[in-house]
Amino acid sequence: MSRKKGLSFYHRKKKISSAAIREIAQWAFLVFTAVLIAAVLVVSLGLRTSVIGVSMEPALYNGQEILIDRFLYKIVSPRRGDVIAFLPNGNQNTHYYVKRVVGLPGETIQILDERLYIDGVLAEEDGEYDEMADAGIAAGGVTLGSDEYFVLGDNRNNSEDSRSGNIGPVKRDNITGKAWFHMASQKEGMGFIK
């Protein structure tokens, strides 16, 4: 019998071991479980809402979706600099307001010469925000109660916040939670809120 001359190729079937299949299945199950737990936690402990208006620019933009942690403030108090979501005066028929905490319970907040003072001391904002043309109710000073917070929008001259008489200091019971993550907008990608 004669052999054919030239190249010949043998096709070997690759075998996938049952151990490799089992390991892939375990990883897929772990990833699925982690995603499911994360989704349940975000839905049950969190809230997704949109920023309304330009009051938080440049940190957050009009229409930008944000995630709110509704659980955190059950165990700790809001801190200065936190971005919070709240219902003004507990009004359930309005949208969530999103603002930054600048005044804590017991402090006296005053806006004097377009600048923020806390207990008579100029706030350390290092020119991060615009000077405020309208001091509102804080012109003469506002002393916060034991459960009240003073909030301002980052876009200080285009914000309805605690300076406004119809909002005023925000009671802790009216705070829904801390804004911690923002979705992508036309101006920036997704990320954590600073």
Image (spheres, rainbow, N blue to C red):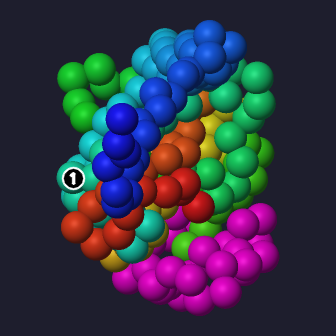
Please determine whether, in this image, residue 18 is positioned above or below residue 134: above
The one nearer the camera, 101 or 169, is 101
Residue 134 rendering spot, x and y as whole percentages = 37, 75
- Name the residue located 59 percent from the left edge and 89 percent from the top edge: 127
Which of the 4 image quarters holds residue 80? bottom right
The one nearer the camera, 47 or 104, is 47
Magenta highlight on residue 134: yes
Residue 45 can be seen, yes or no: no
Please determine whether, in this image, residue 149 is positioned above or below residue 190: above
Q: For the N terminus, give its image quadrant.
A: top left
Q: Amino acid at mark 1?
A: Gly
The one nearer the camera, 43 or 159, is 43
Magenta stretch, main secondary structure, is: loop
Question: Callout 1: few (<14), some (14-19), or many (20+) C-alpha neighbours within 10 Å?
Answer: few
Residue 69 can be seen, yes or no: yes
> Quick one: SS at disc 1?
loop
Which of the 4 image quarters holds residue 67? top left
- Name the residue located 46 percent from the left edge and 27 percent from the top edge: 13
- Name the residue located 73 percent from the left edge and 78 percent from the top edge: 124
Q: Is residue 183 left or right of residue 74?
A: left
Please determine whether, in this image, residue 145 is positioned above or below residue 74: below
* Residue extent of the magenta highlight: 113-142
For label 1, the residue is 63
Q: Is residue 62 left or right of residue 151?
A: left
